[in-house]
Image (cartoon, helix red, strand yellow):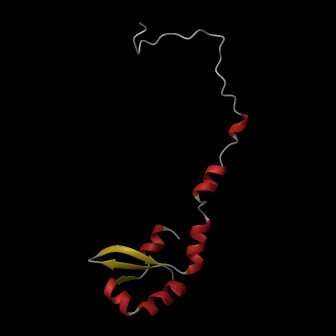
Amino acid sequence: MTVEQLEETTKWQLQEAKQRFSEVVRRAHDEGPQIVTRHGHDVAVILDMEEYRQLKGKQPDFKEFLLSGPDLSELDLTRDKSTEMRDLGFGSTE
């Protein structure tokens, strides 16, 4: 769903959404996301469960994200000792 489509969804004041919750849920299922406002500000979205699952399914959890990275076991992290170390002057050599 695009931002434009979300902006076209029905908005409910919180008090009205509480009183007509069954209708809000039905319309989320039939028509798409329903936005709940409090004092004129968007505070929540009621989604159909299938739409929620689609959104949730697109994002790997943190563990999956880390495991999906490149295999670093093949990376050679040994220091090249063919060159001399030089003093960078960060501390006293005495």
Q: Residue 10: image x %, image y %?
A: 41, 82
User: Which quadrant is home to the C terminus?
Assistant: top left
Number of callouts: 0
Up/down of 94 relative to 16, above or below: above
Q: Residue at x 53, y 71 (%)?
A: 1
38 to the left or right of 31:
left
Residue at the extreme left of the image, as rendered: 39
Residue at the extreme right of the image, as rendered: 74
Q: Residue 47: image x %, image y %?
A: 50, 79
43 to the left or right of 74:
left
Front residue (pair 28, 62): 62
Residue at the extreme front of the image, as rendered: 94
Q: Residue at x 59, y 73 (%)?
A: 53
Q: Residue 51: image x %, image y %?
A: 57, 76
Q: Residue 2: image x %, image y %?
A: 50, 68
* Residue 75 sits in quarter: top right
Up/down of 59 relative to 47, above or below: above
Front residue (pair 55, 86): 86
Q: Residue at x 44, y 88 (%)?
A: 24
Q: Residue at x 61, y 53 (%)?
A: 65
Front residue (pair 46, 93): 93
Front residue (pair 49, 4): 49
* Residue 63 sits in quarter: bottom right
